[in-house]
Image (cartoon, grey):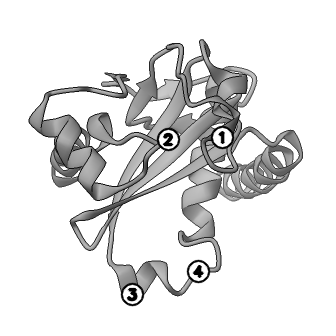
Amino acid sequence: MYRGRKSEEFVYENYYKYFDPKIPLPEEMMRNEENDHQVRRVQRICSMIWNPRYEHLIGNVDFLINKRKYDFGQDAGEFPYYKYSDQVGVLELKIMKGETMNKYISGIPENYKEQHLSYMGILELPWGEIFVLKDGVVPVIFPYEFNQEKFDTVLKQVNEFSYKVISVKQL
């Protein structure tokens, strides 16, 4: 857990805050860093999050993306950032090997997406990002909108598992 927190801080301090989804090029990110132009800001969450509506889910959220008027507009790739301008989002930071990322059609394991979706559900937030530092140097961003149907599926699986554990403990 300690190493995870340290690597998250490293990724945030050296990559995420300088990364511009409108111009997702390493050169632009380095220019932003040289000029200390922080395109993105977040709030570190230093606690586990629990929502009584989802009694068997607990989130260990990395960061919350601050409300901000992002001028990414409708031209910033496929994700509609403009819809979430002025809304808090969930940020999950990861470091992955490129060869691992290449194993997945979407570029990241399904359990990362389910983890992220769970955090959005627990916090009742409409969007978020998984920011991956590929091979320790290449930034890759995966923005997501909350999907209630997928969250309900995850919730059902978590509840079924939890009730089985509770049943066995009561024997």
Quadrant in the picture for the C terminus: bottom right
Whole-number angstrom distance, CA of label 3 to CA of label 4: 10 Å
Quarter of the view holding residue 42? top left
Residue 99: mark: 3
Residue at screen point 45% across, 25% down: 64
Which mark is nearer the camera, 4 or 2?
2
Q: Earlier in the sequence, mark 4 or mark 1?
A: 1
Residue where numbered disc 4 is placed:
104
| Other residues around mark 1 within 10 Å, as few (<14) / some (14–19) / many (≥20) | few
Relative placement, left or right, of 12 versus 147 is: left
| Other residues around mark 3 within 10 Å, as few (<14) / some (14–19) / many (≥20) | few
Residue at screen point 85% across, 39% down: 148
Question: Badges 2 and 1: C-beta atoms under 8 Å apart?
Answer: yes
Quick one: SS at disc 1? helix
Residue 119 versus residue 47 in the image, above or below: below
Relative placement, left or right, of 134 versus 59 is: left
Residue where numbered disc 1 is placed:
75
Residue 22: mark: 2
